[in-house]
Image (cartoon, helix red, strand yellow):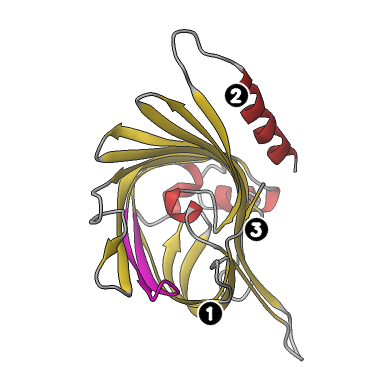
Amino acid sequence: MKLTIRLAALAAVLGACPIAGADPEVRWLGLKLARGIADTKDLGKPAELSYTRPSEGDSTAVVNAGIYGIVGVRLPPFMSEFDGGISLHRNTAIAKKQNVVLSGLGARGEFVEWLQHHFSFQHKNNRLSGARGGVASLDLIPYVPAMLNSRAKISDHISVVPTLAFGTEYERVSSSDEKTATELRGQGLEPTGSVLRLTAGAGFEFEFYERVTFGGTVGYWRDQKQTGPFARDEKSKSYRTLSLALPLDKAQNFAISIDYVRGNNPIEGVSDANYTQITFKLKPSFL
């Protein structure tokens, strides 16, 4: 709530402050739900929720949900968007549990007409290992109208959005709980450290009759330099998903989806995942 108030206040202040020698336009673009805030792919996807309560045994939950606000700044001929928010990534239904909270700020715009960018910085709290630190990332998104990172119409009732992005990210752990620190020192590693990664991602999403969607993504990370707790990680990591979603309302703010997930996502704390789940997805906008 404090973040929302601050973003709205920032938009109001910026909108009231003229910039010398220019005629900027500043607009509050809304408060939205999304799958997460780590990158542009997550910002464009709906939040995911799933809960199971068996008659015997422990209940399980899957949450990939974030809330973020957007401020648009137009200073001809440039247009940029600034976002800020918080997201939770939790899964208690898999063998290697997941519970990570990300919060931070981002900015997106164009380097040139055909190349967009998204820069972000998040505070990361892994609530299972107690590791806390920060993640800074830069994504480059090539853009070709009706061909790449843009909707292409195949027929009157079928369209597809091919996606591609590449970039780099830097993650640092600045502190961890005593149990994790003791375990790392026992392995001859320091409990604090950092890693520099090269990143790449590709995907597609088909839409049928402007309702049913079927898509998939592949994410790839390559560690270039590992210190501290990251020294025990594999240098190469990949993360694959497939999803079939059926909307529950005309505005497509709510949907039921069957998702397949496999691999490792170091930012969200996913490790050796391999599962299929049915999730409730929501993507409404507020304010």
Give me the C-alpha separation between circle 3 and circle 1: 22 Å
Q: Is residue 174 above or below residue 265?
A: above
Residue 193 tag number: none
| 262 inside magenta stretch | no
Give me the C-alpha separation between circle 2 and circle 1: 44 Å
- Element on which disc 1 rests: strand
Q: Nearer the viewer, mark 2 or mark 3?
A: 2
Mark 2 — residue?
15
The residue shown at (31%, 66%) is 160
> Residue 176, located in which quarter of the rendered image?
top right
> Residue 137, located in which quarter of the rendered image?
top left
Taking depth in this image into account, of 94 and 32 the one nearest to the observer is 32
Q: Earlier in the sequence, mark 2 or mark 3?
A: 2
> Residue 156, located in which quarter of the rendered image?
bottom left
Q: Nearer the viewer, mark 2 or mark 1?
A: 2
What type of secondary structure mainly makes up the magenta span?
strand
| 219 inside magenta stretch | yes
Mark 1 — residue?
277
Give the position of the N terminus as an image quadrant.
Answer: top right
Mark 3 — residue?
128
Q: Which residue appears farthest toward the top when viewing the image?
A: 20
Q: Is residue 78 above or below residue 224?
A: above
